[in-house]
Amino acid sequence: MAGAIIENMSTKKLCIVGGILLVFQIIAFLVGGLIAPGPTTAVSYMSVKCVDTHKNHHKTKWLMPWGPNQCDKIRDFNEAITKEIQANDIVFSVHIPLPSMEMSPWFQFMLFILQLDIAFKLNNQIRENAEVSMDVSLAYRDDTLAEWTEMAHERVPRKLKCTFTSPKTPEHEGRYYECDVLPFMEIGSVAHKYYLLNIRLPVNEKKKINIGIGEIKDIRLVGIHQNGGFTKVWFAMKTFLTPSIFIIMVWYWRRITMMSRPPVLLEKVIFALGISMTFINIPVEWFSIGFDWTWMLLFGDIRQGIFYAMLLSFWIIFCGEHMMDQHERNHIAGYWKQVGPIAVGSFCLFIFDMCERGVQLTNPFYSIWTTDVGTELAMAFIIVAGICLCLYFLFLCFMVFQVFRNISGKQSSLPAMSKVRRLHYEGLIFRFKFLMLITLACAAMTVIFFIVSQVTEGHWKWGGVTVQVNSAFFTGIYGMWNLYVFALMFLYAPSHKNYGEDQSNGDLGVHSGEELQLTTTITHVDGPTEIYKLTRKEAQE
């Protein structure tokens, strides 16, 4: 009889396969740690206060902070008062990038956060629930001599969350509030070399626009973009892994279709997991180098969501098909209680992402967190997704416990077998437990490396060698899940190896009515696999 490759592979060959996969896993970490630079770079920008006295603000010209056509500048607002310049005529100008530099499509995205420097004044304090309203215009060009082309023009409201730690007395006037940073802008592609931001703070006392927001001294921005060197390494990994997973997926499904029976549920789920991994691997990001595809961030989130939903579903079904005591085997409907929270949680996160990055496709300054209603809506989606995730892990932990308990109980029938068969089944049980532990190890490594990447400086120095921890996290974990899916499709593909008749059920040392059953994982041409057959009688009881 034939079974899955993992059932018929000797321990020596299994160790060799595991060793080869471990070597590739180490290489994946080393590629990110030693070859790639840090994943992202943060650049600080200080706005320049320009004066625009034209009647039609912003429609006549763009105000450059520096260069041959730079604007008329003032140093501070005291100078503006001296020159009788009104607040509506002051424009905060920021050029991206810094002088003598260029942006590149290899940067992939731009994320900006905003910091307001607000001074304390007794007669101009920040009122409770104050909101600053900015009139923001974004333009681009690809040549220093070309005209600026408008990319976006929006009114951008942001709620101020500031505290003043000193006593509010005259002697403390001029000290700065401590204000939280504000989300400002996110663009999903960097298709142009130069960008220009013109920010106005229009004042309207009748409509109470920008009244009671304190004395704003300066506007600072921090721009974050992906490093070009890391992007190239990331693209190279995806280009290499795509054919690898695709080939093993085709090979896996071909071996299944060669059998006379239809595929069982676990085989279908493993194949679907391979498809989702291939979908996330396909390096469509190469096209972002030549095309202005601002939807790439949203598309990447959707691809990751599909893969993780499929991975969580696989874990549930993998455990369920090894339970030995449930009757709804080989049907996805039997797992609706466990898969339901995955579907609900994934849907909530998808809606949240569409409300955030979906809207940013047309308005790069939008953020769902800037309004009370948006914040409550976002928190509701995240809380529901978190509850679903907790329910899922409770189901998963319970099922894993049940599987290990049932297998331990079935081991009592092993002494009645012949030595050869007993060793064979002991090996099968060991391999199942080993695969479960490997799954837990992969999940644990993902969490551990994520925590390490958040609490460290981003790189470690050992002698003269600098290891980029964050880059190693991205490439290592990405490679790890690819190797995990690769190993699943290889080890659980149907084997063509057959046992002789001398190792049939008669050799088990038990009566024919006590045919053994361990799991319902894979069935071969003639029926269940070896691993399918431990103690069916006990399971039915």
Image (cartoon, rainbow, N blue to C red):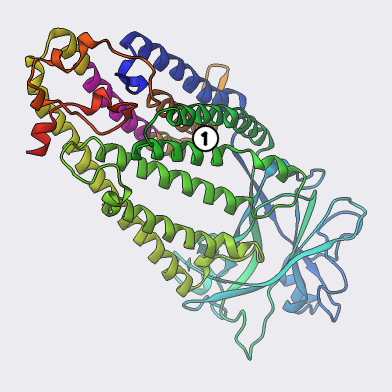
Q: Quadrant of the N terminus?
A: top left
Measured as percent of width and height from the top left, residue 258 is found at 45, 27
Q: Which residues are magenta?
A: 426-445
Please give the name of the residue rendered at 58% of the width and 32% of the height, measured from the top-left corner. 242
Q: Quadrant of residue 496?
A: top left
Residue 228 is left or right of residue 417, and the answer is: right
Residue 52 vs residue 446, the one in the foreground: 446
User: Disc 1 marks which residue?
Assistant: 474
* Residue 224 pos. (x, y %): 62, 48
Within 10 Å of the Cα at label 1, are there few (<14), some (14-19), or many (20+) other Cα atoms? many
* Label tally: 1
Seen in the picture, residue 95 relative to 396 is either above or below; the reply is: below
Which quadrant is the C terminus positioned in?
top left
Q: Residue 437: say if magenta.
A: yes
Determine the image quadrant of residue 415: top left
Name the residue at the bottom extreme. Answer: 206
Q: Position of residue 136 (x, y in %)?
A: 70, 69
At a point 79% along the width and 43% down the height, the residue shown is 101
Q: Of helix, strand and loop, which one carries label 1?
A: helix
The residue type indicated by label 1 comes to Phe
The foreground one among 214 and 83 is: 214
Quarter occupied by residue 175: bottom right
User: At 69% across and 37% down in the image, what residue appears?
Assistant: 228
Can residue 135 be seen here? The reply is no
> Is 166 located above or below residue 326 in the figure?
below
At horizontal 36% and vertical 40% (from top left) the residue drawn is: 314
Comparing 49 with 425, the one in front is 425
Residue 203 placement (x, y as % from top left): 67, 81
Q: Is the stretch drawn in magenta largely helix, strand or loop?
A: helix
Vertical side of 333 occupied by 518: above or below: above
